[in-house]
Amino acid sequence: MAATIAIELYTLRDFMNDQRGFVDTIKRVREVGYEAVEFAGVTAVEGETPDTTAVEVRRILDDAGLTCASAHRRWGSLRDDTDAEIDFLQTLGCPYVAVPIIIDEYDRYAYEGYQAFLADLPPVVERLKAAGITLGYHNHSIEFLRGLDGDTIYDLLIEQGGPDLAMTVDVYWAAVAGVNPVNLIERLHGRVPVIHMKDLEVALPDEGHMPLPVFAPVGEGNLDWDAIIPAAKAAGAETWVVEQDLCRRDHYDCIRSSLEFLKPRV
């Protein structure tokens, strides 16, 4: 299967507060050269006063020649309104959805919060699977906290999430947590259909002298892409999602740089 490089729309969230902004953003994404998106952070659809429906999103994507390769959706909605979420994802033609964070539903800083998440997980995974949609979990750095037994929250998710729970590995946040992204990806062979690609560099803060990690376009930072990309291919990654949570220069220049770096490599 040919690799798909998608842009995480959360990267461009500031430009999509209404339908006009969403349309303009999608057009520019296509002009940059992307052929797919990961749907997230679109205020025009998910905000307090949305003005764009799922049907309209699909039309806008179709008109631009873009597909929806993946989405991030709130766990509370996936759990409590599963049928509505399935309808939304199927309308977009989206085969994969990830839980981006569990901050609103459980205590994300405690093992007990993730245990509660795992207890609620199986029926949602099954219903999505029956609808042709794979459910995944997207990591930040918090999941690599270690408990008294030495295991991390991520260990818990891998071991108790079941084989049908995919893992959207975010290589940046793994690296921030001190985890080697290559080792993590190799451990998840067959469970990483979608991977988040963002680079990490260090920069001096406005005050102080200790360099801090910051987001960077893929290929412009310090992550070892010569090792990460082959490992992800071997693990079965099919969708490579470019995400840059914060851009320190023009957003479209950043996502163009990432795309140009990845295209000949994946």
Image (tube, rainbow, N blue to C red):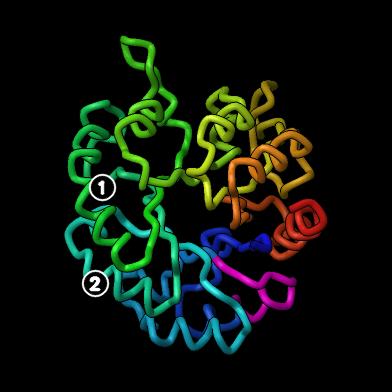
Q: From what the image shows, is residue 43 above or below residue 180?
A: below
| Amino acid marked by disc 1 | Asp
* Secondary structure mainly formed by the magenta segment: helix
Give residue 23's mark.
none
Q: Is residue 82 magenta?
A: no
**Which residue in the structure is indicated by mark 1?**
104
Q: Which residues are magenta?
A: 25-37
Badge 2, how many Cα within 10 Å: few under 14, some, many 20+?
few
Q: Position of residue 128 (x, y in %)?
A: 30, 61
Query: Can residue 13 be seen here?
Result: no
Q: Position of residue 207 (x, y in %)?
A: 64, 29
* Image quarter of residue 97: bottom left
Q: Quadrant of the N terminus?
A: bottom right
| Amino acid marked by disc 2 | Ala
Q: Earlier in the sequence, mark 2 or mark 1?
A: 2
Q: Nearer the viewer, residue 206 or 68?
A: 68
Residue at 65%, 72% in the rendered image = 35
- Say left or right for 186 vs 137: right
Q: From what the image shows, is residue 145 above or below residue 51?
A: above
- Mark 2: which secondary structure? helix
Q: Nearer the viewer, residue 233 or 25?
A: 233
Q: Nearer the viewer, mark 2 or mark 1?
A: 2
Query: Can residue 151 be seen here?
Result: yes
**Which residue in the structure is indicated by mark 2?**
84
Q: Nearer the viewer, residue 189 or 15?
A: 189
Q: Position of residue 93 (x, y in %)?
A: 45, 75
> Circles 2 and 1: CB distance less than 8 Å?
no
Residue at 51%, 35% in the rendered image = 188
Badge 1, how many Cα within 10 Å: few under 14, some, many 20+?
few
Q: Is residue 34 magenta?
A: yes
Q: Nearer the viewer, residue 53 or 182?
A: 182
